[in-house]
Amino acid sequence: MSNSIISVNNLVKNYGNFQAVKGINFEVFEGEIFGLLGPNGAGKSTTLEIIETLRTKTSGEIFVNGYNIDGQQNEIKKIIGVQLQSSGFYPLLNLVELIQLFCGLYNRNVDALELLELVNLKDKATAQVKQLSGGQKQRFSIATTLINNPKIIFLDEPTTGLDPQARRSLWGLIKNIRAKGTSVILTTHYMDEAEALCDRVAIMDFGKIVAMDSPDKLIDKLVATGFERPKEVKKANLEDVFINLTGHSLRED
Ligand code: ADP
């Protein structure tokens, strides 16, 4: 797992005289789930949107699957999938019709029901997005990232606002997508999610990457400095209680 599929060198983004991204460097390897973490305003969305070709950079070099963002944006667009917020979907179309619409836009032919089955939404094929629960909407928007059979998908806070079962269901889906060979780059504010999903994370703050490694190694490094968490007196937490009482299965369907 050492072939780099995204390579970012010295990326800078200025908005007027404010520097939102201050010369960052990182690589995403083929087949990995890479997390971009950091407080609001750290520069995560700016960075991702530049790689997605949706925003221009001020300076620096970016290669996606070997394509240079300077001059080869169309090639890059063909091999990436970007998650849209569900508010961006045409309200009157059902899920199958929306997938068919995207197929037309991407000039691809995809079996809509097969795709819906992959995200556990086959029985909602004729529903409109507004009739879906939060978790189902997220699963549908992830499905739409897969229509052009991308090598990399970009997920922006894919589980924000979901209940614990729906979050776990999304984690399973994201792992399945990676198991099929797609690289995943995501942002999240949930550290348990980053720990459960990501092979490596970069932590951004004030436009810089302040740490980058596997969650496990980052934790070990902190512990090696003598850091110790206040001892947990209980062997479970409230989320364990919640899951234990309400079960692991999805409710929304
Ligand atoms: P994050 O995704 O980590 O929350 P963003 O990339 O959205 O961070 O924003 C980084 C910084 O750049 C923030 O201070 C934000 O206010 C600023 N910013 C983002 N977009 C613009 C813009 N279009 N014009 C001016 N400043 C912006």
Image (spheres, rainbow, N blue to C red):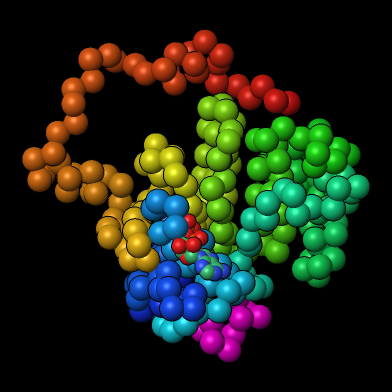
Seen in the image, is 219 located left or right of residue 61?
left
Viewer-proximal residue among 27 and 204: 204
| Residue 29 is one of the magenta-drawn residues | no
Q: Which part of the image, by quadrant, shows the C terminus?
A: top right
Establish if 55 lies above or below 152.
Answer: below
Seen in the image, is 106 located left or right of residue 91?
left
User: Which residue sits at x=55%, y=40%?
Assistant: 160
User: Which residue sits at x=23%, y=15%?
Assistant: 233
Q: Which residue is outermost to the top? A: 245
Write down the quadrant of residue 118 in the picture: top right
Query: Horizontal and vertical percent for residue 248?
Result: 55, 21
Q: Which residues are magenta?
A: 65-76
Q: Which residue is outermost to the right? A: 92
Seen in the image, is 227 located left or right of residue 116?
left
Establish if 171 lies above or below 232.
Answer: below
Viewer-proximal residue among 174 and 238: 238
Viewer-proximal residue among 91 and 15: 15
Count of numbered marks = 0
Establish if 244 lies above or below 15.
Answer: above
Write down the quadrant of residue 192 in the picture: top left
Write down the quadrant of residue 22 in the picture: bottom left
Viewer-proximal residue among 227 and 149: 227
Query: Horizontal and vertical percent for residue 16?
Result: 49, 78
